[in-house]
Image (tube, rainbow, N blue to C red):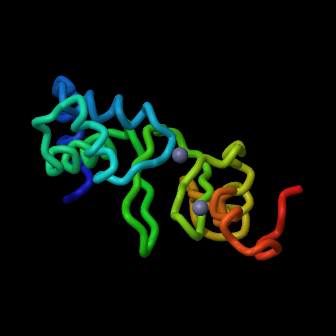
Amino acid sequence: MEDSRRMKTLDKQRNLRMTRQRQGILEELRKTDTHPSADELFSRVRQHMPRISLGTVYRNLEILSELGEIQTIEMAGSLKRFDGIAENHYHIRCLVCDRLVDAPLTVSTELENTVQGYTDFSICGHKLEFSGVCPDCRRHQSPGAYPDND
Ligand SMILES: [Zn+2]
Ligand SMILES: [Zn+2]
């Protein structure tokens, strides 16, 4: 779809009243910081809206993401995950259990300025994901397998 048409579609959707189902999905997503997949979110939402379908959840997550209300987090080899926080922030992913948590760091515009300074690109943003092993998984590994925090 070309950009102007895409924007028009988005404007139209923005003006549409948020449906009750979409509102419910958004609220459920914002209640958690586990960055659930669509399937996980579906089982949560279904507890309040027993008649909702997985397809409806998928479709509304796509719309919410296009509207900029939520973020999708995609990584090769992993399920698509959803984040109720729309502003850019960094994540840490556990290499063992795929758990995804927010990294306690301020997003660095300095990083973007540096990259822009060294290339011909106009930098519009960046995403950053750290990888590691979460405390639960570390506990189940042999001692000394990973660097310790203390
Ligand atoms: Zn883990
Ligand atoms: Zn997040």
Residue 135's x, y, as percent?
69, 56
Which quarter of the rendering shows the C terminus? Answer: bottom right
- Residue at the spot x=38%, y=64% of the render? 79
Residue 115's x, y, as percent?
69, 64
- Residue at the spot x=14%, y=51% of the render? 55
Give the camera-side residue of 65 and 55.
55
Residue 64's x, y, as percent?
30, 40
- Residue at the spot x=32%, y=45% of the render? 41
Residue farthest to the right, as pictured: 150
Would residue 43 be found to the left or right of residue 13 on screen?
right
Residue 88's x, y, as percent?
55, 45
Which quarter of the rendering shows the N terminus? Answer: bottom left
Would residue 75 be found to the left or right of residue 103 on screen?
left
Give the camera-side residue of 30 and 73.
30
- Residue at the spot x=26%, y=37% of the render? 45
Would residue 11 be found to the left or right of residue 113 on screen?
left
Would residue 106 be found to the left or right of residue 26 on screen?
right
Give the camera-side residue of 57 and 112.
57
